[in-house]
Amino acid sequence: MLPAFERASGALVMGLVLADIFLTVLYARIGTGLIADRVAHLTWAIFRAVDEVGQKRGAVLSFCGPVILIVYVLLWALGLTLGAGLIIHPALGTAVRASSGETPADFMTALYAGGSSMAIVGASDFKPVTDAYRVLYLVNSLVGMSVTSLVLTYVMQVYSALRQRNALGLKLHLLAGETADAAELLARLGSQGQLDSGYSHLADTAAAMAEMKETHHFYPVLFYFRFRQPFYSVSAQAFIVLDTVSLIRSGIADRQAAWLKEAAAVDAIWRVAMLLVVTLETTFLPGDLPAPADVTSAESEAWRTRFAAALRRLSAAGVETMRNEAGAETYLALRAQWQPHIARLAPAMAYRIDEFEPGGEQ
């Protein structure tokens, strides 16, 4: 390989790796990574294939998120080492020499010298003897120190965001009495018909959903963190909050809660939850969004049964409900807007959408 071409190839490799680190860690926008996003998707596909062979669904997938972070670190470290090695290789024995004895000129030695030049401690068996390579070693040391700091900070931020997502899932799960039932959640928030007392929880949920949407926008790797309990998943959280808003808008009588149907927090929950599932769907699932389809008779019957059960629970909590066909039709129309998206997103994380229904987890 010609020395000039080898140096140029090394500079290109380092440039691509640094660009990928910039887009993944600093620019932090979903779907913009050059290499990391594709590697994460490939890693997920491998884990998914292995998981389907096993007997316990989801057991293997629970390791995928942490493994992807390890793969990121190895990918970037090896990429920078390869780039530095390609640049140093033509200079072995001339501009870069061993500290003692004869200087080997093989490529493995170049990789060792390149990796050592990026170490924070700066210790190496090889030293530059020209000004150009002294500058290269200095730049490599600064790059290695900066990348190490950035990657460590990125990993900590990912786990901080994951903790926030899990805390929201657990909060919704507990507010619903560990039933995964939006009607139960709404009945508890409006116990004895006092819906205004539960509005603060809805406002907090709207804020938490907005934060979760942005954390997935900044750290798309969160999508690959899967837990055994369905209520920790994005799909389950979106399911219960969208079902809650649907019940508010269709099942509660206007005389008691017209103000709640028009409240900013309720509208914000709907909008941000829809935005979240559609963003994840378009980013991580192949193909275009499915075209709106007519609700089947089986779905319509199941949703009507669900709506009737929800009204009974709300009535038992002292909430005045809408017991007419218009309420049921409104619920069906609202559910038809979000159900197809979650039904497509949930299997991508090896969940069944029926796990999100009341009693489905059990």
Image (spheres, helix red, strand yellow):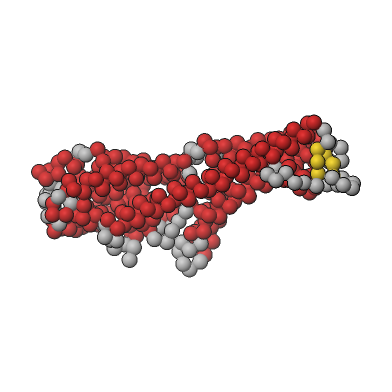
Seen at 29% across and 40% down, the residue is: 268
Residue 360 spot, x, y in % from top left: 31, 62
Q: Is residue 101 left or right of residue 52?
A: right
Displayed quadrant of residue 83? top right
Seen at 47% across and 53% down, the residue is: 225
Seen at 30% across and 43% down, the residue is: 206
Residue 144 spot, x, y in % from top left: 66, 41
Displayed quadrant of residue 170? bottom left
Extreme left residue here?
A: 255
- Position of the N terminus by quadrant: top right
The answer to whether 226 is drawn above or below residue 253 in the figure is: below
Say if residue 59 shows up in the picture: yes
Residue 306 spot, x, y in % from top left: 22, 56
In-front residue for pair 76/342: 76
Total numbered labels placed on residues in the image: 0
Residue 145 spot, x, y in % from top left: 64, 41
Seen at 70% across and 42% down, the residue is: 118
